[in-house]
Amino acid sequence: MSNNIDRRDFLKTAGAGALAFGAAACGAHGSSTTQEPTGEMEYRINPGNGDKVSLLGYGCMRWQMKKNAEGKDEIDQESVDELVDIAIKNGVNYFDTSPAYLRGQSEAATGKALSRYPRNSYYIATKLSNFRDHTRESSEKMFFDSLEQMQTDYFDYYLLHAIGRGGYKAFKERYEDNGMMDFVLGERKKGRIRQLGFSFHGSQKEFDEMIALHSRYHWDFVQIEMNYMDWRHADGVRNVNAEYLYEVLDRLELPIVVMEPLLGGRLANVPQNVTVMLKGRDPDASPASWAFRFVGSYPRILTILSGMTYREHLEENIRTFCGFKPLTQDELGFMEEVADFIAKYPTVNCTHCDYCMPCPYGIDIPGIFAHYNKAVGDGIIVDSPEQENYRRLRREYLTSYDKAIETLRQADHCIGCGQCLPACPQSIQIPKELRRIDRYVENLKRHR
């Protein structure tokens, strides 16, 4: 398989910048950053229905949270409104959410923020997230509840959420045996679903089974995990090389929505020596911008989702996608070298989606994995007491672990019940990884 891209075909398909599509101006929000965006937002045309979709899509999984009067976590609606305002003013028009995001709060917060704008000025994508209860009654209720929460009477893009695990057998149980495929096909015919697709997590065999259903259901688009690490470094069991997924979908001429372009933030916060590699190539480019440009360099990509919690994240991404510059062939080769280098680091493949939460025993699963991955990236993981700077690195890890994760929520409290396993879209063996990290911590405590 090849990642060669015909530059002429790319410009013809994607447009030589958003001017070809009458793009919205960037920088309209009066950014507080020192570097203003240049150019205009990049758009891609959906060949199936002509939608002009911003290449930067807003993933609404990571809205900022705050404590309410009862001390419970709730979405900070004021922050959501501000971020949506900035996004729309700068040309972002695709917003992706789910009934499962942020423990059921994301759709309502997103819908409230978007409802302040004309409905035809943005695209809503949400999902049938019937993981735990896929009865017909419950699944239909989820669909209509989503319409109400999003304050709309139709969905632009509707996805069967996280299919692939368990192959066709699991798909049949969730969507065919209960009549939900007949339901969503009917809703597409009525116009309440404008585009019907699915988000995929699974093996190559499972992907092939889902794609085989295209002749029956005529998918309008597919959402996949794609980034420069998963392009050729997926493990082949929990996920598939994105190169394979892309080429199959490209051959079928199906628009692609990309999730995890930053691999749960890990490609925005790469190890220091990787940062040196990237800065050596372009001192002004951030690690995140390299990752986004990699994905956006492929013309079948309709939009690239990014879960932007804070204003500075959004503004940085806007700068990347305004006056968007696809990678050259030489730069694509360079990113392969970077991926090969990062692949040597023993991180946990957690994207911090929080599907595994809440843990019945209070363990902060994504927090533990995020701390461990950051320690690997920062170079404070140690192998043995003979290692140079062992005492300092040991102290740094243990101190930062206690600061990041409350004692009662640390890995040593996992009893291996396995309730988290079915919820993980990456198929991480969570209890096993928690035990591995706990053994590492205990070894550090013993070897002073």
Image (tube, helix red, strand yellow):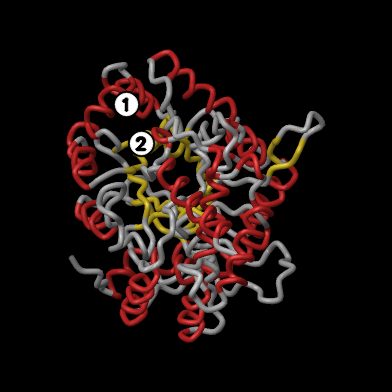
Q: Is residue 346 above or below residue 429?
A: below
Separation (CA) of disc 2 from disc 1: 8 Å
**Which quadrant is the C terminus positioned in?**
bottom right
Q: In the structure shown, which secondary structural element does the residue marked by tag 1 occupy? A: helix
Residue extending farthest to the bottom is 280
According to the picture, the residue beneath numbered tag 1 turns out to be 185
Q: Are marks 2 and 1 in contact (CB under 8 Å)?
A: yes
Identified at 37% across, 33% down, the residue is 160
Decide which of tag 2 and tag 1 comes sooner along the chain.
Answer: 1
- For residue 428, above or below residue 173: below
Q: Which residue is mark 2?
A: 196
The one nearer the camera, 16 or 407, is: 407
Q: Where's residue 234, x and y in %?
A: 30, 57
Residue 393 seen in this snapshot: yes
Q: Three-letter amino acid code at disc 2? A: Leu
Q: Residue at x 42, y 26 (%)?
A: 130
Residue count near mark 2 (Cα–Cα under 10 Å), binned few <14, some 14–19, many ≥20: many
Compared to residue 277, the image places residue 371 above or below, namely above
Q: Which mark is residue 309?
A: none
